Amino acid sequence: MARRSEAVRVGCLILLGQVNSSVHSFRLIPRRKYAVGRSSSSDFVVRHPSVSRSHAELSVSDFGIAIKDLGSRNGTYVESSRVVEGKAVPGQRLRFGDVSFLVTALSGALEEGSADPTDLGANSRRPADHFPDISKLTPAQARVFDLLLQGFSEKELAYRLGLSANTVHHHVSAIYRAMCVSSRAEFMARAQLK
């Protein structure tokens, strides 16, 4: 895996995050601009009080996401740095107000103009083998999923979430079943779609 500071040529990008206890994923295709905000006219509607109606604009190049904050009240962040204009690459966290998304790469799996470019929820027309179906995870499993993507061990997850190691293990097993994987290595490969 390339380091974040290195340029990485990508196809489509996915923003994965949790909004109000449900997991959301948005697909971004190159050479297109996307409006992010609470407004129903946004390309990516994020219904959360910390997100402005017209919060940010994203555009995808071959090397990542260009971000432009549109004067939002609670800011747009790449990792922990507030940006007016910035860039994010796969593996980095992008945050709108209090809502965080992980940027992941989807290399060449979907062509421009195919399927709905904004939502990979349960009604998406994308092929099932290109992206894991995380839409059916429970809110607790979604929290575990998010921390798994950050690389935490099951023991660390249990500590951070205030759960028993056994409960976390059951959540991890359910996530693996939902993604049709059987190990952490397969999970990371499938979730990151390298």
Image (cartoon, rainbow, N blue to C red):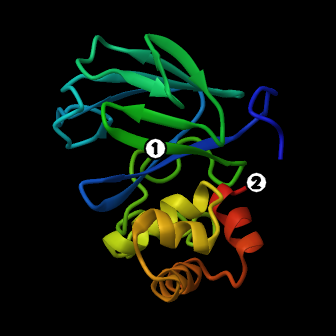
Give the SS element for disc 1: strand
Q: Position of residue 155 (x, y in %)?
A: 59, 73
Few, some or many residues within 10 Å of mark 1 (<14, 14–19, 20+): many
Front residue (pair 160, 139): 160
Give the SS element for disc 2: loop
Q: Position of residue 111 (x, y in %)?
A: 63, 47
Residue, disc 1: 101
Front residue (pair 159, 103): 159
Please tell me whether residue 171 is drawn above or below residue 112 in the rendered image.
below
Residue 194: which disc?
2
- Disc 2 marks a residue whose amino acid type is Lys
Please tell me whether residue 78 is drawn above or below residue 68 in the rendered image.
below
Please tell me whether residue 33 is drawn above or below residue 136 in the rendered image.
above
Few, some or many residues within 10 Å of mark 2 (<14, 14–19, 20+): few
**Picture quarter containing residue 164?**
bottom left
**Residue at image point 70% right, 64% down:** 188
**Residue at image point 72% right, 48% down:** 107
**Residue at image point 53% right, 50% down:** 114
Q: Position of residue 192 (x, y in %)?
A: 67, 56
**CA separation in Å, label 2 and label 1:** 18 Å
Front residue (pair 76, 14): 76
**Picture quarter containing residue 124?**
bottom left
Task: Tell me the quarter of the image containing the C terminus.
Answer: bottom right
Res 116 visible: yes
**Picture quarter containing residue 127?**
bottom right
**Residue at image point 53% right, 68% down:** 157
